[in-house]
Image (cartoon, grey):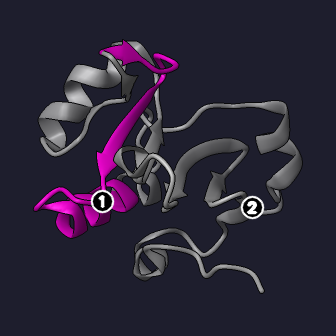
Amino acid sequence: MKKPMPYDFLLDYLPVSVVIKPAIGMFYIYFEGKIVLIFRQVGKNPQHNGIWIATRREDHASLKTTIPSVTDFVLGDDEAFEPNWLQLKDDHEDFEEAAIALCELVSHRDKRIGKTTPKAIQFTNHHN
């Protein structure tokens, strides 16, 4: 039996044309040829649970200003993860409001969110 997608209420705030691809405990969200978000809720390493945001290092400061609940992705021992990702932790007190704001940025095609990858292009329908 497959686990249900976490934070599925957020689908109401994302474009209907997003493509969702489940992975182990994670759900990759693609939109218009880009990976935009990953939803994660897993028992192992719960500090990584929440929403991962595909972005560029140069956009981190402005995204953190727009949505103050967003943080750098940290693996542990202060070791930063792949520098293009930010995280909204699911235990943050403003998680729902911040998550909705993130989804609205995606819906409005905010240039700060999204990364083109071969898989993203493969999973996206270009007939919009």
- For label 2, the SS is strand
Instruction: Estimate the x, y position of residue 123 in percent, counting from the top left.
Output: 83, 53
Q: Image quarter for residue 112?
A: top left
Q: Quadrant of the N terminus?
A: bottom right
**Label of residue 90 in the image:** 1
- Residue count near mark 1 (Cα–Cα under 10 Å), binned few <14, some 14–19, many ≥20: many
Write the residue at 24% across / 40% down: 70
Relative horizontal placement of residue 78, taking residue 83 as reference (left or right): left
Q: Residue at x 60, y 75 (%)?
A: 16
The C terminus - image quarter? bottom right
Q: Are marks 2 and 1 in contact (CB under 8 Å)?
A: no
Q: Going by the image, does 21 lie left or right of 14?
A: right
Task: Quadrant for residue 34, please give it.
Answer: top right
Seen in the picture, residue 5 relative to 113 is either above or below; the reply is below
Q: Earlier in the sequence, mark 2 or mark 1?
A: 2
Between residues 1 and 81, which one lies in front from this camera angle?
Answer: 1
Where residue 33 appears, as percent x and y from the top left, is 73, 44
- Left-right relation of 106 to 126: left
Q: CA distance from mark 2 to mark 1?
A: 20 Å
Q: Identify the element where label 1 is drawn.
A: loop
Specify whether residue 90 is painted magenta: yes
Q: Residues within 10 Å of mark 2 (few under 14, many from 20)?
A: few
Q: Tell me what residue is drawn at x 40 percent, y 52 percent.
A: 46
Q: Which residue is mark 2?
A: 21
Residue drawn at 30 percent across, 15 percent down: 78
**Amino acid tagged 2:** Lys
Q: Pick whichever, 31 or 71, lies toward us.
A: 71
Q: Nearer the viewer, mark 2 or mark 1?
A: 1
The magenta segment? 78-104
Q: Position of residue 119 (x, y in %)?
A: 83, 40
